[in-house]
Amino acid sequence: MFESNLEYNNISRSQEDDINDASNVNADIDNDNDNNHINEGWFLYWKTSASLWKGKLEKFPKSKPLFIPLNWAHHFITETTLGSNASKDVELPQYDFGKNRPDTNIAELASIATELELNAIFLFPTTPNPLFANGGIPAYYAKSPSQTEDGITIATATDHGKINRIYSFFDPRVYKGYSKFSFEFSRYLNENNLNIHIAILNCGYFNKNNQFISYFEDYSPCFENGLIKYSEVKRREREKERESESEFSENNRNFKESNNNNDDQLIIETKKKIEFYEIIKDLYITTAKESIGDNFEGVIETAFLGGAPLDIINRSIEKYEHSIRYFPYIMHSKIIDVIPTTLLLPPNIKEGKITKVMNDFLDVPLIQNKLENLNSYENNEFDFSPLNFFHLYTHSNNSITKNDPWKLTGLINYLDKNYTQTYTLFTNTKNLSNDDSTYDKSYFLIGANLSSNEFYNALKIFMNGGNVIIDTYNLHAPLMRKLDAFFIENSVPLQKINYVTEVTLASLGQGKMILFNRQKIGDESFVKKHSFWENIISYFNIDHLKLNFENDVFFQWKGRRPFHNELEFIEIRRVIFYNPSSYKRTVKIQKNKNFVLLKTIDEQNVFVNPHEKGLDIDLMPNSSVGIDFGHLE
C-alpha cells in the first residue's frame, strides 16, 4: 500500500453522534490557511473564536467580495454542545445564533464586516459543502452517505488531509432538519432587522470528463428509495386519471400505452430520475429563498478543485499530485460560469502558478454578474473584465455533455479551436435582460427553451445592435409567427441560404440575427460542422488575435474601455499566459493590423520577442506574463 498523508476518521457513527458536530467543525482552527482564504475572499467564521473575527477580517481586501458560507451544523446545538450551560427548560436540539455561543452570532459578524467596509456575501447552503464535517449536515441527521453513479461513497479531503464524508440531501430526515434551520434563520433575520447580502450556494466538483457535478447529486440507496416512492405516487396519480376517463378516452389511452411500451425503458427511467432530482433540488432552493426573503442576491455555483471523490486517491500518492492537473478545471470554470476555489488543495500545491491564475481569475465583474441586486461596487468600465464574445444558452451546466445542442452541432469544438476562452455557457437567461452592453456580444439561443419574455429580450438585443442566433428546432409555433410578424412590421431585409441546413440572415441597423435548424447538422462530418460555423460567425466580423500555443500553456482574455489618452483604440485587450509545467513552452501570436502591442506586465521567467510577423513568447517552467493590445477602430 502507498503511504498517505490523509487523516481518516475511523470512529463509528454512534461515536460521532456523541462527539457532535461542534467539535468536528472546529477541529481545524489551528490549521486554518489564512493566506489561501484571504486571496480568494472566503472567511470561515466557525474556525475562529468570535473575539478574533475583527482581527482576521482586517486582512481581507475591500476591493473584492467577502464570501461567508453559513455552516448549518455549527449552529445546531444539543446537550453535548452546551455542556453545563444546558438548561432543563430548553427543548433540544435547536439552533443557536449567538444566544449561547458568541461564535454563532451572525449579526455581530455582519456588523464587523460593515464597520470594516467589506462587501460581505453570506452563502446559504442548498447542497452539501465539502468544507464542513458531514458536508455541513449535523451528525444528528447525517445517516445516509452519498454515492456517485459508479457506487463510490463521496468524501473529500481538506487542505490539511482531513476526510469529510458527504451525506445525502435526499434523506427525509435531512430535509426536516434543513427546513427547521431555514425557519429559525429567517426568524433570526427578522428579529434582528438584518439587511445583509445572502446568496444561495451550490457546491460541486469536476469529474474526469470535465463536467461540473453538484454535491447534491446522489445515487445512493437513499436516493433510489425516494425515487421508488415518487414513482409509486405518480403511478397512483395515473390510476386516478384513468378512473375518471370516459370509455372513449380509455380506449385511446390503451392504444397510446401499447405504443409507449416500445420506448426505450432506460430513457424512461432516466427521465424519472431527472424529474425526481429536480423536484427535490427545487424544494431545497424554494425553502432557502423563503428563509432569505428580501436579502436574496442570486446563486453562486462553486467548483472545489480537488473535491472529486477520486481525488482522494491522487492526494494520497504524491507523484500524481501537481498543480498543473487543476489548470484545465480553472479555465473550464469560466466557460460554464462557475467560480473555482482551491480551498481544499494542500499548501504545497498552491506554491506555484495556481495562486497567480486564481488571483487573475476572481475579479469583481465575474462575481457581480452572478448576483442580482449587489450594488456595493461601482461599475467601472475601465476595469478589466473577462472577454466574452459569445453567450451560449443551454439546458444544464453539467458541463458539455454529448446531448448538448451546441456540442452536437460542432459549435463548441469550433469555438475551442478558434476563440479559446472567449465564450460562456449559461443555464438561465437572466443576463439577457440585465446586460446593457450587447453590441459586442453574440447570443446563441435554443428556440425550444425560449419563454415569451426571453423571446422579447432577444428581439430587444437585436434592435439594440446585438447579434442573436436562434436554433428554431422545436421553437413554439406562436413565437415563430410573432418573429415573422416582427420582420414584416419593421421591414427587416431577409436573406435565405441553404448550406448544411436552411439559414435565414436578418439585419437591422447594427443588429444581426441568424435563424437555423440544428436537426440536419448533428449527423454531418466534423469538417462540414466546422465550415458551417466558420461561415456563420464570419457574418459578425469579430476581430481577434490568433494564437498558436503548445500543450500545458493556459491563458485567459480580458478587456476594458480605453482611457482618455487611448482614444485611438476602441478597446484594450489583455491576454495572460501561464506555464505551470516543468518544461519550456512557446506561444506565437500572429500579426493583426488592427491590434497594437502596448506593453507586457508581470513578466515572470518569460522572454517576449516581437518580429514583423507577430510575437513569439518563450515561457520558461513555472512562468507567466500579461500582454496588453490596443484594438484599432
Image (tube, rainbow, N blue to C red):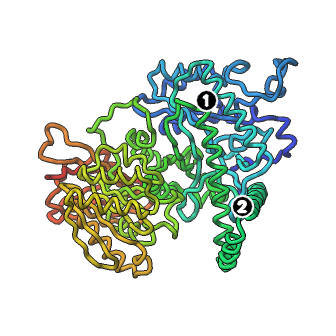
Farthest residue toward the front? 247
Q: Is residue 521 above or below residue 311?
A: below
In the rendered view, would you say 457 is above or below 270?
Answer: above
Is 429 on the left or on the right of 127, as rendered?
left
Residue at the image position 75 percent from the left and 43 percent from the top: 174
The nearer-to-camera label among 2 and 1 is 2
Q: What residue appears at the point 38 percent right and 54 percent down from the top-left corner?
A: 455
Q: Please give the residue where the numbered disc 1 appears in the rendered image.
A: 45
Q: Helix or strand or loop: what does disc 2 sit on?
A: helix
Q: Residues within 10 Å of mark 1 (few under 14, many from 20)?
A: many
Residue 421 placement (x, y as % from top left): 37, 57
Relative depth, front residue between 324 and 80: 80
Asked which quadrant contains residue 612, the reply is bottom left
Spatial CA distance of label 2 from label 1 is 53 Å
Query: Residue 241 has which mark?
Result: 2
Residue 141 x %, y %? 78, 41
**142 or 473, nearer to the observer:** 473
Give me the residue at 57% from left, 64% from top: 208
Q: Amino acid at mark 2?
A: Glu
Quadrant housing residue 278: bottom right
- The answer to whether marks 2 and 1 mark residues whose Cβ atoms lie closer than 8 Å is no
Residue 301 visible to an observer of this rendering: yes
Three-letter code for the amino acid on which mark 1 is drawn? Tyr
Question: Mark 2 or 1 closer to N-term?
Answer: 1
Residue in the image at 37% along x and 43% along y:
434
Percent x, y for residue 25? 70, 35
Image height of 175 relative to 44, above or below = below
Place of residue 212 in the rendered image (x, y in percent of width and height, measured from the top left):
55, 56
